[in-house]
Every structure is written in C-alpha cells, then in structure tokens.
Amino acid sequence: MLVSALEEERRKLFQSGLLEGKQEGKIETAKEMLAEMLAKGMGLPLISDITKLPESQLVELRDELSSTKK
C-alpha cells in the first residue's frame, strides 16, 4: 500500500511538471508572437483582438520582452 501511495504521488508530481512545462511553453510562444506582431507595427488592441489575450497581459509580456533585451 505504501508503494502504491508513493507511485501515485510520483505520478502527480510528474503530471504537475508536465503541465507547468506546457504553460511555460505557451507563454514563450505568446512572447514570440507578440514580438513579431509589434515589429510589424501592430497595436496592442489589434493583437488583443487576434490573440484573445487581455491588453493588460500583453503589456506584461511586452515589458518582459523589453527587459530581457537589455
């Protein structure tokens, strides 16, 4: 019984790690897309309309992008 409980906990941790990795991947993809859209002169309202992300989140991502470039 202890072994099965440990295996279940290990499985949960593995799944949690996978979900976290997927989320990080989505954020990185969003940053890349945002950078390309901004480089093409698109404004945040249009990007928000296309991506369905709130402008406030786009501003955060944009700020992260600009801070990593410095």
Image (spheres, grey):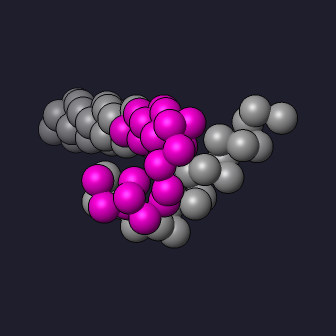
Residue 49 sits in quarter: bottom left
Magenta part of the chain = 26-50
Figure quadrant of the C terminus: top right
Q: Where does the image place residue 51, in percent across and percent down from the top left?
A: 31, 52
**Towards the viewer: 20 or 48:** 48
State the residue lying farthest toward the right. Answer: 70
Q: Where does the image place residue 40, in percent across and percent down from the top left?
A: 50, 37
Residue 68 sits in quarter: top right
Q: Is residue 24 left or right of residue 65?
A: left
Up the image or down, 21 lies above or below 23; here it is: above
Picture residue at 33% right of the left edge, 35% below the top: 22
**Towards the viewer: 39 or 69:** 39
Picture residue at 31% right of the left edge, 40% below the top: 19
Figure quadrant of the N terminus: top left
Picture residue at 60% right of the left edge, 50% below the top: 62
Residue 52 seen in the current view:
yes
Q: Where does the image place residue 6, in percent across and percent down from the top left?
A: 28, 35
Q: Is residue 48 left or right of residue 55?
A: left
Picture residue at 66% right of the left edge, 47% below the top: 64
Q: Where does the image place residue 14, in percent across and percent down from the top left?
A: 31, 31
Up the image or down, 10 lies above or below 50; here it is: above
Q: Is residue 44 magenta?
A: yes
- What secondary structure predominates along the stretch shown in magenta? helix
Residue 31 seen in the current view:
no
Up the image or down, 16 lies above or below 61; here it is: above
**Towards the viewer: 40 or 29:** 40
Up the image or down, 55 lies above or below 37; here it is: below
